[in-house]
Image: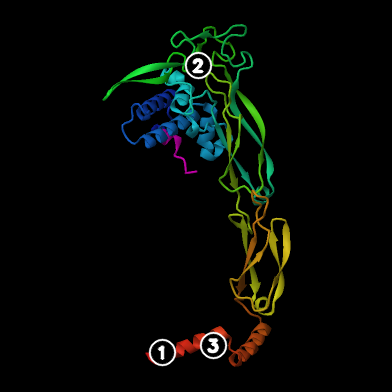
Amino acid sequence: MSAKRDYYEVLGVDRGASPADIKRAYRRGALKFHPDNYKGDKAEGERKFKELAEAYEVLSEPAKRQTFDRYGHEGLRGSGVHDFSSMGFGDIFSMFEDIFGGLGGGRDRRGAAHGYDLETEVELTLVQAAKGIDQTLEFERMDFCDACAGSGSRPGTKPDRCSACGGYGQMQQQVQGFFGVSVRIIACPKCHGGGTIVTDPCGDCRGSGRRRKKRVLSVHIPPGIHDGQVVRVRGEGEPGPGGTARGDMHCYVRIRPHPLLGRQGDDLICQAPISFSQAALGSKIQVPTLEGTMDLEIPAGTAHGEVFTVKKRGMPTRSGHFGDQHVQVLIEVPRKLTPKQRELLEAFAKTEEAHVTPQRKTFINKLKEYFTQT
């Protein structure tokens, strides 16, 4: 996900702006970037329109605004901020109908009454990502009012059928174009696509049919999940206007870096330092894995940077298999030597003159040949 801009910057207001200033700024910007008004690139206009809606949702609610002022975007994780990227324009206008006076409809891009999606983020260790985990989420969402069961009408009464659309929630609109008059279907502007109008509102929810409620949810994160992947929990979002179907919860997964293991796809990588004598003579070393440490045989004559692969010690895959773990050995050269170590190495160095390694011998021969020719 790309970095989000400061919400005050998005709305073009200062941090001390009043609620009325924030509302005016949002209305002005949203109407400017609405597809019926925006003359520039439509995709860019849609992105800015939804960015404005997200900024307004946070800054218009005192609790969320206070959290954002203190902790920024990080503080809003799991706070129930809507996933506006999945909404249609009509849905967004319906959410803030008190601002726009009924502009827009209550249908999403799929044309059906569908609830609002929410998004949150969970952070896992690499071990948790490998084994899978049931993660508990706590958040707030708009839910059906218990008093009126979501109808918006006072208990014991029912909403009236919309007289403008006859209860269908949609109307035909004639549009004059270059080639003549065309007809398009739009959400009814009077009932916002719901088909009914509340005439005797519920006292608890004031006719909206919605109340903010706390929700505790257990989400299963499958083994082997990658950083940035999304787990969608169907039906755990918010109910939409005029419909009983809830939206979904999108749970973005972040995996904390492991102090010893890196990840490439389904494989794991680690670097293990060894001494010169271990590389020359061979040795057995301990290396980290997801399940603890394991012994790894280092054969005599191992070179710096050589990689050893341990099969099936990586991350699990969807097919039920496992990736591999690759161990790269790095030969450390001591910066300080004791007198005894220096004495032994100097004695060893004298033996190297009589026993030149093949690679070094080839290099010396090429060096002599090059400078002889020049």
Q: Position of residue 106 (x, y in %)?
A: 48, 21
Seen from the viewer's position, the closer of residues 217 and 321 is 321
Of pointers 2 and 1, the one earlier in the residue sequence = 2
- Above or below 269: residue 60: above
Residue for badge 2:
194
Of pointers 3 and 1, the one earlier in the residue sequence = 3
Q: Looking at the picture, which amino acid does disc 2 mark?
A: Gly
Of pointers 2 and 3, the one earlier in the residue sequence = 2
Q: Which residues are magenta?
A: 1-10
Q: Looking at the picture, which amino acid does disc 1 mark?
A: Phe
Spatial CA span between label 2 and label 3: 86 Å
- Image side of residue 356 versus residue 283, left or right: left
Image quadrant where one finds the C terminus: bottom left
- Above or below 262: residue 284: below
Residue for badge 1:
371
**Does residue 8 show up magenta in the picture?**
yes
In which quarter of the view is residue 148 placed? top right
Spatial CA span between label 3 and label 1: 16 Å
Q: Residue furthest left?
A: 178
Tag shown at residue 361:
3
Q: Residues within 10 Å of mark 2 (few under 14, many from 20)?
A: many
Q: Are marks 2 and 3 in contact (CB under 8 Å)?
A: no
